[in-house]
Image (cartoon, rainbow, N blue to C red):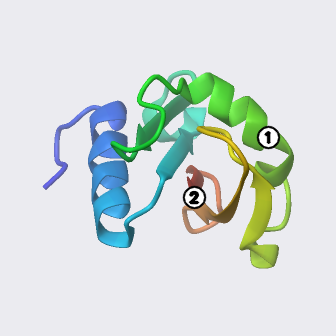
Amino acid sequence: MWSGDEPSQIGRTLLDAVLGLLRLDFAYLRLGDSFGGGPPIELIQVAQRRNPAAQPEEVGRALNDWRAGDPSTSPVLVPNPVGEGKIVIALRRLGLQEQIGTLVAG
């Protein structure tokens, strides 16, 4: 399905699927440089009822403390990076040795 696509297109497709299947407020993906052979890629998909102008870099910075933490402690209640209030997030590292990137669902 993703054969030959750019890493950012693969990431957007993954985020669209996760957002729709789980009915999330947002899904954030950071792919490390080992995935695409270039600089890290940050992507975000936001539910229509939320802030459509949210920037991946801003959300990444807001989630930085939790992205570096232990994913086994997910879900975690954090300040909402795409709106007001607090939101529950789940964090999962991607790859056999967690080297591909990080997926955050909120």
Numbered mark located on residue 32 in the image: none
CA neighbours of label 1 inside 10 A, class few (<14), some (14 to 19), many (20+): few
Quadrant of image for the N terminus: bottom left
**In front: 59, or 84?**
84
Residue beneath disc 1: 64
Asked if residue 32 is positioned above or below residue 41 in the image, the reply reads below
Quadrant of image for the C terminus: bottom right
Q: Image check: 57 left or right of 74?
A: left
Residue beneath disc 2: 106
Q: Residue furthest left?
A: 1
CB contact under 8 Å: marks 1 and 2 = no
Q: Measuring 48% from the left and 49% from the top, which residue is drawn there? A: 26
Estimate the x, y position of residue 77 in percent, counting from the top left. Answer: 78, 64
CA neighbours of label 2 inside 10 A, class few (<14), some (14 to 19), many (20+): many
Three-letter amino acid code of the residue under disc 2: Gly
**In front: 54, or 2?**
54
Three-letter amino acid code of the residue under disc 1: Asn
Estimate the x, y position of residue 8 in percent, counting from the top left. Answer: 36, 32
Mark positioned earlier in the residue sequence (1 or 2): 1
Q: Measuring 85% from the left and 59% from the top, which residue is drawn there? A: 69
Q: Quadrant of residue 30?
A: top right
Q: Measuring 63% from the left and 53% from the top, which residue is drawn there? A: 99
